[in-house]
Image (tube, grey):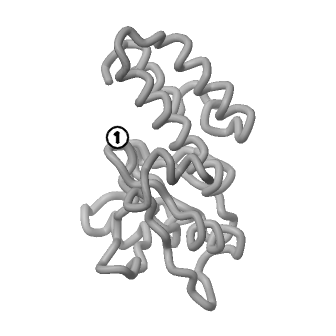
Amino acid sequence: MLDLMQLYGTDGAVLHPIQDPSPVDAATAQFLGSVGLPHGRFFSSRAGLAGVERDPYVLAALFALGDRYCPEESRAWHVLGYLPAALVVLDPSSGAVYIFPESARDYQLAHRDVAALVHCLTEFRKLEDAYNAPEPDVEGLVDTFRAAVNAFDPTPLTDPDSEWNRMLEEVHEEMW
């Protein structure tokens, strides 16, 4: 994940301590502990951080704070962070990543695992950086993003109503 360090710097990657026993599957724990998650303007992965330790941040407790409905099957999922208009969570038993769009009761499968989430975030950061150049080729940037994401994990773009497709529409409409 060289791109992660190049795009976000050493301060822009949040590592999660590996616990024994781990509340998440082994592959996810290893990835979060060795590669981590990016933290920047577009994705905040500092949810639940206290000092250098990551507090247990379980979805049911977070939703209870806001008196928000939490689907039964997702109550034990872990909060990974926030996109501009969505909460990003992890099913600790499967390693799958889900998104709860802002103000929605239901969730969407977003990524097969945290590696796919990080890949998608780094590709979006590249899109965002290129978008801010003088006279960007918006269509080309979106096409490049789609190709890079689909080659690694097509899950984020499969559903036309997915959060990632919604964000790409905003890029097309030059709302960024």
Q: Position of residue 17 (x, y in %)?
A: 51, 80
Q: Amino acid at mark 1?
A: Ala
- The one nearer the camera, 44 or 123, is 123
In the rendered image of this protein, does residue 89 appear above or below residue 119? below
Q: Position of residue 86 (x, y in %)?
A: 39, 45
Q: Is residue 32 left or right of residue 54?
A: right
Q: What is the crowding at mark 1: few (fewer than 14 residues within 10 Å), some, or many (at least 20)?
A: some
Q: As drawn, which residue projects farthest toward the bottom?
A: 20
Q: Position of residue 107 (x, y in %)?
A: 51, 48
Residue at 40% over, 21% down: 131
Q: Secondary structure at mark 1?
A: loop
In the rendered image of this protein, does residue 24 appear above or below residue 67? below
Residue 25, quarter of picture: bottom right
Q: Is residue 87 left or right of residue 65?
A: right
Q: Is residue 15 left or right of residue 39?
A: right
Residue at 47% over, 45% down: 7
The residue under label 1 is 85
Report whether residue 60 is seen.
yes
In the rendered image of this protein, does residue 57 appear above or below residue 103? below
Residue at 40% over, 77% down: 54
Q: As drawn, which residue projects farthest toward the right?
A: 151
